[in-house]
Image: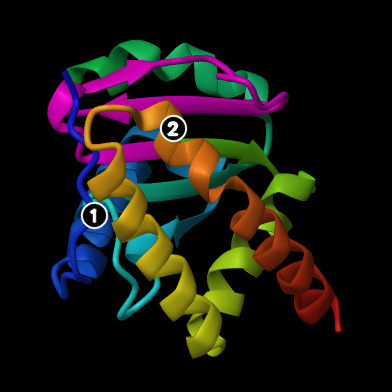
Amino acid sequence: MRKVEVCPYNEKWPAMFLEEANKLKIIFGNDIVDIYHIGSTSVPGLKAKPIIDMMPVVKDINSIDRFNAEMNKIGYIQKGENGIPGRRYFQKGGDNRTHHVHFFQVGSYEIKRHLAFRDYLRFHPESKKSYGELKEELAQQFPYDIGSYINGKEQLVKEIEAKAIDWYQG
């Protein structure tokens, strides 16, 4: 069973992102337009589950499926869209998850949504602090219930996301 763990920011997370991004660039080559470090591990000082979230942006989302075998070779399990239309999602590490990869096609609204949320937290310390504290409390309250952990964050995430989109567009 996977334990919900939230820990202090780790200075090694950006390097872990870069190391894995280089592996993806080798596999996908020119299909990748850009790769972004997203999620809580991309926000310096934010408490986070120690899982690196990566967002490669590609020219054609449908081209990703032909790389599933290569992704498996470096430890990833493909999950298809996994609830978000237009995404290709991969997980690495099983119950001791280390990486999530969220592929989106150029022009997807999801790209802006993820970058806005990340950047808003980077520039708004009060939101970063309240979000980190909530995640830590929920991880303690629901150590083996990821669904309750996610549901517990949902309202605050929606509030921050709405502010973030306005701020990002402004």
Query: Is 129 displayed left or right of 70 in the figure?
Result: right
Residue 47 sits inside the magenta stretch: no
Q: Earlier in the sequence, mark 2 or mark 1?
A: 1
Q: Quadrant of the N terminus?
A: top left
Element carrying mark 1: loop
Residue 148's mark? 2
Q: Secondary structure at mark 2?
A: helix
Disc number placed over residue 6 in the picture, else none: 1
Of marks 2 and 1, the one in the foreground:
2
Colouring style:
rainbow
Which residues, given as a range, are shown in magenta? Answer: 74-101
Indicate whether 88 appears above or below 41.
above
- Amino acid type at circle 2 is Ser
How far apart are the two marked residues, 2 and 1, measured between alpha carbons? 14 Å
Is residue 132 depicted above or below 168 in this figure?
A: above
**Of 154 and 161, the residue lying toward us:** 154
